[in-house]
Amino acid sequence: MLRDDDELLAWMVLSRAPRLDVSTLSRAFRDLNSTSAARLLHDAGAALQSAPLPPAAQRFLAGACASDAERAWLRHPHHHVVPFVDERYPRLLRDCSAAPVALYVSGDPAVLNDPQLSIVGSRNPTAAGRETAFEFARNLAACGLCITSGLADGIDSAAHRGAIEAPGITIAVLGSGIDVIYPQHNRRLALEIEKHGAMLSEFPLGTPPRAKNFPRRNNTIATLSLGTLVIEAAVRSGSLITARLAGEHNRELFAIPGSIHNPLSRGCHELIRNGAKLTETTADILSELNFSGFAHPSPNLGSEASGPADFGAGMDKGHKILLDALGFDPADLDALVVRTGLQPQTVSSMMLILELEGHVQAAPGGRYSRVCRSRSEG
Amino acid sequence: MLRDDDELLAWMVLSRAPRLDVSTLSRAFRDLNSTSAARLLHDAGAALQSAPLPPAAQRFLAGACASDAERAWLRHPHHHVVPFVDERYPRLLRDCSAAPVALYVSGDPAVLNDPQLSIVGSRNPTAAGRETAFEFARNLAACGLCITSGLADGIDSAAHRGAIEAPGITIAVLGSGIDVIYPQHNRRLALEIEKHGAMLSEFPLGTPPRAKNFPRRNNTIATLSLGTLVIEAAVRSGSLITARLAGEHNRELFAIPGSIHNPLSRGCHELIRNGAKLTETTADILSELNFSGFAHPSPNLGSEASGPADFGAGMDKGHKILLDALGFDPADLDALVVRTGLQPQTVSSMMLILELEGHVQAAPGGRYSRVCRSRSEG
């Protein structure tokens, strides 16, 4: 595809205009019998004045032009502007109300129409939650689903990483400008995502990560995807908002259940009560989406259905007893003393070793939870 | 109540007869214009011959008499035989098909008509599962629900122990004769259950714990209870059979979710997918059962943060509305649904509780009438 930079720069200007979306701009294009942003802006000043655009957009666009920063950004070969008239613009997004007129993409814009599953959840998950996100993303990406998320810490990052590990495709949707990576420490992850899919934003360059942008970002994540999987989310959280939006767009909703003692299970349980599909394995998702996928050579895929690994193989017998006593729910040292009949001192020092060896994780409130590692790591 | 031991011994003989249940024996009693087992057996040998009983039962009963073991067992003051014509026989059991003609009880037969929740689950649960069973049973028993289970190891035993700890009421339903405690190491627990409720069996004395008896035992557990709570169960397990039976009897089904890495969560997750109520707290159960409970002097009640606030305030507001809607003339459920605007399911379960609490009485034709008790009885 030949890039007409003047046209793309005009789209970048249009995407900065207030109150402009796919439906209002479509109407103007229909009236003008053209789909050229450049013509709308420059070649036909009179046309712009007569176009049925919202007054605020019209005022903004009169005399507006691309900035130096926009020109510089567009020069990079991995940077793309995808207007809604481009066939690479996501079909699922174009059909929804208030769809952005153009998307900023860094990476491969061809993936935007891939079948996607969004994975969202807490920014502060348990170790087990993070691993579940990684494993589900890795296996589903290996089956050909693109994993879409929001580049946040916790579940989001783990999902992106899992998809990259597969190796598969992943998309990060930002609540800031495409040139503003947030959180900043995810800059390296963002570069990896670019190589394995795309970074995506609907906000003009330089837009800071304002709180008011995130509902729109969440809506885009929910809209782009065939379904949304929620892994560990508090009852009042952005993840549940994304899930609600996915439901409103008639997308499938999946939620992972968990211990009734884990506060981050509450959000998922609420979703399940309200009709989200209780999800134990990736097969639950693939079958619900009727997604046959394609055979992707992954050594881990075959072992997915067989359940948990043999945790603690080769471990000292006492440690194994303690790990069995811990089970799959967080527990404090007192509970472990009662369950094992061991001395508190003994339990305490054994837990320290199990923690150092990566078998358990200390959680706030003096509780421990088991670390369920994947077979490839175990 | 005066005990007529000859009559009770005759019931013990009847309960040994093959192919005899409440419905066949009712028919015979109606024809003979009597509800006396002793008269059926001894005073009226001719009556027995002319009674419309199944041939196998008739052959067995001709000349059958109580054994020395039965006489010895009945002599114990805590041992009771509760025939279906006795008002202490559980109403919920009497209404189901193939109900046993008499029950063997050791403990207090008055508890058999208490509103009950059955708690069932794995014989080999995780430590957390065992603690969940104990805590749920303790809190629900403190709210006035009788906890019914099967005296098995694991979840069953933990549930009985929790109810005893409350202190509340608990019933153990056996798959063996009332004089055959299985598993044997639960003999001490059985004695505690006798003191805090009842041990119950429908099988003749000396019946060993045969595998073929357990489906009947499970059916009785499911039938006796307003609802069944499943805590940790494998996908193919007796607990799921009990749950299925509870569903067939239109009882409420509750299941505790858990980690997807815990194989014993699978059964509960399957139940939730099929419509069981995902249960995180005891409040989930109390509200679903519309169970107002009663003020039970328990030091633990206050610490149940998630439970309903106001047990001591007498009758639940919803129950009052329903009782007002019933008025003083018999009415059927449809009429009550129209009068209250409540869901049919809700009205049905609330009426069951009002019936068990003695506020209303079921009349022929599916109609209910109010029981106007004096204050001194209330």
Image (cartoon, coloured by chain):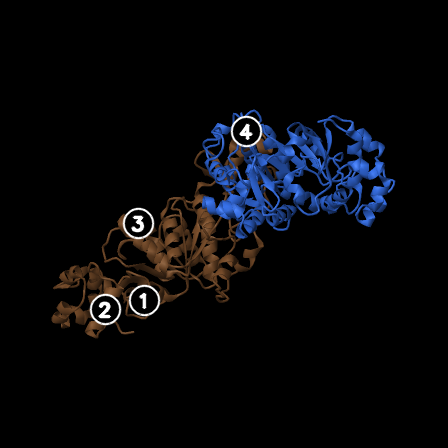
Chain colours: A brown, B blue
Residue A344 numbered tag: 4
Residue pointed to by mark 2: A27
Please name whichever residue, A313 or A140, is drawn nearer the observer in this view of the structure. Answer: A140
* Nearer-N-terminus badge (1/3): 1
Q: Quadrant of the N terminus of chain A?
A: bottom left
Identify residue type, mark 2: Arg
**Disc 2 and disc 1: Cα gap in Å?**
18 Å
Position of residue B230 relative to residue A297, above or below, is: above
* Nearer-N-terminus badge (2/1): 2
- Camera-near label (4 vs 2) is 2
Q: Do the residues labelled 4 and 2 touch (CB within 8 Å)?
A: no
Q: Mark 4 lies on which chain?
A: A
Residue pointed to by mark 1: A89
* Nearer-N-terminus badge (2/3): 2
Identify residue type, mark 1: Tyr
Task: State left or right for residue B109 relative to residue B315.
Answer: right
User: Looking at the picture, how far across and down is residue A241, in whole percent?
Assistant: 36, 50
Identify residue type, mark 3: Gln
- Camera-near label (2 vs 1) is 2
Circle 4 sits in a helix, a strand or a loop, which is it?
helix
Can residue A219 be spotted in the picture? yes
Q: Mark 1 lies on which chain?
A: A
Residue A224 lies in what quarter of the image? bottom left
Residue pointed to by mark 3: A184
Q: Do the residues labelled 3 and 4 touch (CB within 8 Å)?
A: no
Residue at the front extreme?
B329
Please name whichever residue, A270 or B222, is drawn nearer the observer in this view of the structure. Answer: B222
User: Looking at the picture, how far across and down is residue B366, in whole percent?
Assistant: 59, 46
Please name whichever residue, B259 or A60, is drawn nearer the observer in this view of the structure. Answer: A60
Circle 1 sits in a helix, a strand or a loop, which is it?
loop
Position of residue A338 relative to residue A84, above or below, is: above
Q: Are the residues under badges 4 and 2 in a single subunit?
A: yes
